[in-house]
Image: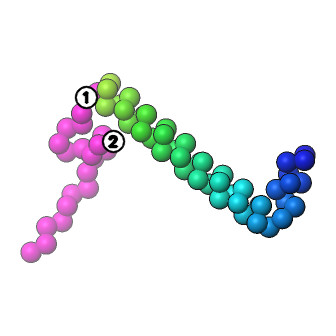
Amino acid sequence: MNFLKFIFSNFWIWLGFFILLGLSYDFFIKIYDKTSRHKRIMKHGYPPAHCDVDGDFKEKEIEEE
């Protein structure tokens, strides 16, 4: 409860808390993405040429004339 009182005590403290929260959330999502990609590549090998790094089908590239 004291933590919430501290966060809401000042606008700048509240803003800083949410900035740090957003940065840490992004950091952990990137770590999860990298480790899951590593596990997929180790399990199935490098994806074939018609797939991207994650193993999803590539979108067909439109050739401009």
Residue 32 lies left or right of residue 1; in this view the side is left
Residue 4 lies left or right of residue 14; in this view the side is right
Residue 47 placed where, x, y %? 24, 36
Residue 18 image point, x, y percent: 69, 58
Q: What residue type is labelled 1?
A: Gly
- The residue under the point 89% across, 54% down is 5
Residue 45 shows which numbered tag?
Answer: 1
Q: Which of marks 2 and 1 is nearer the N terminus?
A: 1
- Give residue 17's quadrant in the image: bottom right
Which residue lies most toward the left here?
Answer: 65
Q: Which of 25 and 20 is in front in this view?
A: 20
In the picture, which quadrant includes the C terminus? bottom left
Residue 55: horizontal and vertical position, in percent?
30, 40
Give 55 or 9, whichever is nearer the viewer.
9
Is 52 located above or below residue 60 in the figure? above
Q: Distance between the residues labelled 2 and 1?
A: 11 Å
Residue sitting at 58 percent across and 53 percent down? 23
* Label disc, if present, on residue 56 of the rendered structure: none
Judge by depth and name the residue closer to the eye, 35 or 65: 35
Residue identified by numbered label 2: 54
Q: Give the range drawn in magenta.
A: 44-65
* Rendered location of residue 56, percent (x, y): 31, 44
